[in-house]
Image: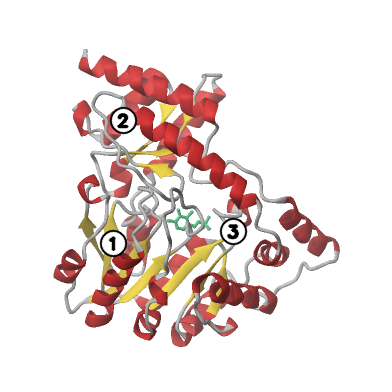
Amino acid sequence: MNYRISDRAAALSPSLTLAIDSKAKQMKAQGLDVVGFGAGEPDFDTPQHIKDAAARALAEGFTKYTPAAGIPELRQAIAEKHRRENGLDYKPSQIIVSCGGKHACYNVILATCQPGDEVLIPAPYWLSYPEMVKLAGATPVILPTSDQTEFKITPDQLRAAITPRTRLLVFNSPSNPTGTVYSPDEVRAIGEVCVEKGVLIMSDEIYEHLLYEGAVHRSVASFSRAHYEHTILVHGFAKAWSMTGWRLGWCAAPEPIAQAIDAIQSHSTSNPTSFAQKGAVAALTGPQDHLKSWLAEFDRRRRFAWQALNRIPGISCVNARGAFYLFPNIAGTGLKSTDFCARLLEAEKVAAVPGIAFGADDYIRISYATSMANLEKGLERIERFCRTLRG
Ligand SMILES: *Cc1c(COP(=O)(O)O)cnc(C)c1O
């Protein structure tokens, strides 16, 4: 039998995050004391009222197909969230609820990009974006940045990268993996270049609520009618409501794009899980006070980790005021990221994600979605590891 794998699937890069993660899990299973900084999800539980709403829906038999784009109640609640928090006017018909924010991104790219199209992706990037672009048959074009500019692209850099083939800019602020938050003025300027050049923006705003030190999030769609018309906003329940396993996200798009995504989804996944959607309604319409204590705790860890990293020889880390990641520069250790992370895991049993997975080989990603005790222990080990490199 010839198990020929399609070109489409064969072109994908295997996930480095998952490789490190499985090595770390294997070591844990052997009883080793591994400290994990790889987490891409909050370490808090989903708030109880959200779980209750889903449990109630399940008990009441809300277990059948729903409309592919989500239940009207949830699409309405999402439209109201955007009006209330972002000053954005979306009709429920412009909102498509998908099986996670990742699925929402994939739908957006599939609905808008095709062979011959170029998609601009600032690096360091969330590692799924380029692979999604490849799955759509389009070409990822990477815009490199460094810690010198807090990992931000500039309007001039963006303008210079746009060609007649450019279809879409992927924009993610606050950012995974860097924690960078663009200021409102910077977001407006990036949007203006896209408007001027007729390029769509996929704005992944899933970390919108995770902000520290007075950082402000402004959706690129919110600056003008033209910005709004060029933007497809992606969001989800995973991060601010700690619902990663529920698989629920959404996009808010101009009507024709929303309709295309509805069609794609109706022939692929159909609706996201029915009773999970009822939980999501509770997430948006219920109390939000969980967020305040989560943010206080994240911020405490963030400050601690940032200071501890900057005391380690060979490492420097820019401040990052969003999400739950720091992205320290390790160039001073003389190692590239894969080597650094493999040796760190071997020598000190600390799992971090090599920056090369995000298109930045001189960095590693540290997630502070883990306990303060783990941060203290793990950072002490990283320091010891780095001292051995120098000695
Ligand atoms: C976590 C995350 C998502 C969405 O995750 P889901 O679990 O699929 O909802 C989307 N974009 C970025 C940058 C993320 O970090």
Of labels 3 and 2, the one closer to you: 2
Residue 390 falls in which quadrant of the image?
Answer: top left
Q: Residues within 10 Å of mark 2 (few under 14, many from 20)?
A: some
Of labels 2 and 1, the one closer to you: 2
User: Going by the image, does 162 lie left or right of 111?
Assistant: left
Mark 2, ligand 1, within 8 Å: the answer is no
Q: Identify the residue shown where x is 66% and y is 73%.
A: 74
Q: In front here: 139 or 240?
A: 240
Q: Position of residue 185 (x, y in %)?
A: 31, 67
Of all residues, the one furthest to the top in this rendering is 391
Q: Is residue 18 above or below residue 136?
A: above
Q: Identify the residue shown where x is 54% and y is 25%.
A: 373
Q: Secondary structure at mark 1?
A: strand
Q: Residues within 10 Å of mark 3 (few under 14, many from 20)?
A: some
Residue picked out by circle 2? 310
- Cα distance between the residues tagged 1 and 3: 24 Å
- Cα distance between the residues tagged 3 and 2: 36 Å
Residue 298 showing in the rendered view: yes
Mark 3, ligand 1, within 8 Å: the answer is yes
Q: Secondary structure at mark 2?
A: helix
| Three-letter amino acid code of the residue under disc 1 | Ile
Disc ID at residue 247:
3
Residue picked out by circle 1? 121
User: Going by the image, does 149 lie left or right of 206?
Assistant: left
Residue 69 showing in the rendered view: no
Q: Position of residue 61 (x, y in %)?
A: 83, 66
Q: Is residue 3 above or below residue 303?
A: below
Q: Is residue 216 above or below residue 264?
A: above
User: In the rendered view of the protein, which quadrant contains the C terminus?
Assistant: top left
